Image: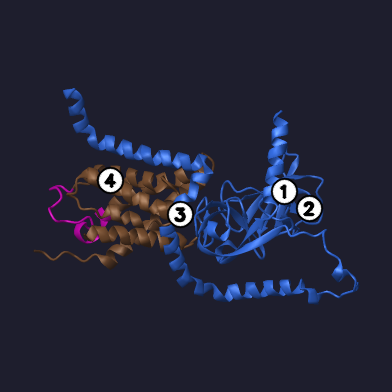
Amino acid sequence: MRHGIRFVGLVLVQGLILKNLEAGYLINPFLYVLFILSLPFELPAWIGLLLAFALGFFVDIFYGTMGMHMAACTMMGWARPAILKFMNPRDGYEFGMQPTIQDMGRMWFISYAAILIFVHHFILFYLEIFSFREVWLTFVRVLVSTSATLLLVIITQFLFYRKREPA
Amino acid sequence: MRNLIVFLARHYFFLLFLLLQSIALILVIQHNYFQHAAAVSASNAVTGSMMETRDEVTQYFGLRDQNIQLAEQNAILMGKLETAYLNYDTTSFSVEDTTHRLRYSYIAAQVIDNTVSLRNNYIVLNRGRLQGVEPDMGVITPGGIVGIVREVSDNFCVVMSLLHKDSKVSASVKKDGTFGQLNWEWPDYRYGVMVDLPTHSKIAKGDTLVTSGLGDAFPSGIPVGTVMDFEKKAGDKTYTCRVLYTTDFRKLQHVYIVRDLMRPEIDQLKEKAGVKNAE
């Protein structure tokens, strides 16, 4: 339920506000990926993948770019379990923990988010130009936008997520 | 058979990924090769009306600039009124004017969604099929050109902005009429680049470029931009110019969709000529 609200909210924020935030050609933040980042650890991987696919679909509708966000999100949904496994804390993920700064610590969350956002933006921007011209400029765009998205994701986390009270 | 099931069970996650990813990629490729299948989704009624609501709120922020623009345009129009002309020939009013026939009419529209910082930018307007908009119509502002209508739904249309990698407009140098092709100089939304301008053109920095009237979308003589710089690249037989657009794409709100009243006639004629060529 909480995730449903987050899904709709992030798609609307992205499609109606961030899309028209013209901060220059280098900076195109895509905050909506926060939804994929904050899926619970114990969610089966294939459900996460399907959700990512659906998320991309709705964002595509707003951007009028059928398929691009779908492809980028699907790639992200596929990479996520592998990265979670790779970044596994020594004693595994505790039940009830959320992938947030508050639960997992600053270092863990930033590297986790940065890798996945980079994957997403990389696919997205290169699909957008759809050719091998402008390769370097696009790469700069990927890096700058990744940082912008990461910053927004972190700010949003501090604004909206409360530290879980120890039960 | 059992092996297959075991294989599927073990790799179901990767296979699902492959399936979804190929759906997405097929959509991307279709989108790229069939421009017309492009922004269909963006013009659909749901997102269209949401964008319109958002625009009703954000419109107020640009009111000052819009008022100035409209006032300027009023001034130009007033200059064209009958009362602004001195009447030398008193007999002319009774002569039926058959040499001037109305060719273009304009549909006023509001921009309800617009981007400038993507590689391929689209603009959504709040006019559609019911108001007489059709694909391939041009879109202009009082001061410049904006793009070409790509997709139309009942009440909205999606316009391919000049800021698009496939945007090609025929523009001519106002003072001598030589023309070239205007593309967008990605990534800056203010600049375009004009290629294939013949070297006998007497172009200079600061010259005004206007639409050439070639192609179907725009009437001729609408300002497009000013020449910032031009050069002849080694090995080329033509000039390449850097152009500052007169349209400010970040401040678009009121635009006009150009309806060419003689379009059906031209299309018919072309079709006929095409048939003859084929014979």
Residue B251: which quarter of the image? bottom right
Q: Residue at x 52, y 62 (%)?
A: B126
* Label 3 vs 2, first from the N-terminus: 3
Camera-side residue of B84 and B207: B84
**Residue at mark 2 shares a chain with residue at mark 4:** no
Looking at the image, do the residues carrying marks 4 and 3 touch, with CB atoms under 8 Å apart? no
- Chain containing the residue with disc 1: B
Q: Amino acid at mark 1?
A: Leu
Q: Tell me residue B224's x, y (percent).
A: 68, 58
- Chain containing the residue with disc 4: A
Q: Tell me residue B25's x, y (percent).
A: 41, 39
- Dot 2 corresponds to which residue? B203
Alpha carbons under labels 1 and 4: distance apart: 48 Å
Chain A: what color?
Answer: brown
- Say which element carries label 3: helix
The residues colored magenta run A89-109
- Whether B247 is drawn above or below B33: the answer is below
Q: Amino acid at mark 2?
A: Ile
**Residue at mark 3 shares a chain with residue at mark 1:** yes
Camera-side residue of B244 and A20: A20
* Label 1 vs 2, first from the N-terminus: 2
Chain B: what color?
Answer: blue
Q: Residue at x 55, y 63 (%)?
A: B250
- Dot 4 corresponds to which residue? A50
- Dot 1 corresponds to which residue? B214
The kind of secondary structure the magenta stretch mainly shows is loop
Single out the mark in the foreground, 1 or 4.
1
Point out the image quarter for the C terminus of chain A. bottom left
B87 vs B151, left or right, is right
- Is A102 included in the stretch rendered in magenta? yes
- Dot 3 corresponds to which residue? B42
Single out the mark in the foreground, 3 or 2.
3
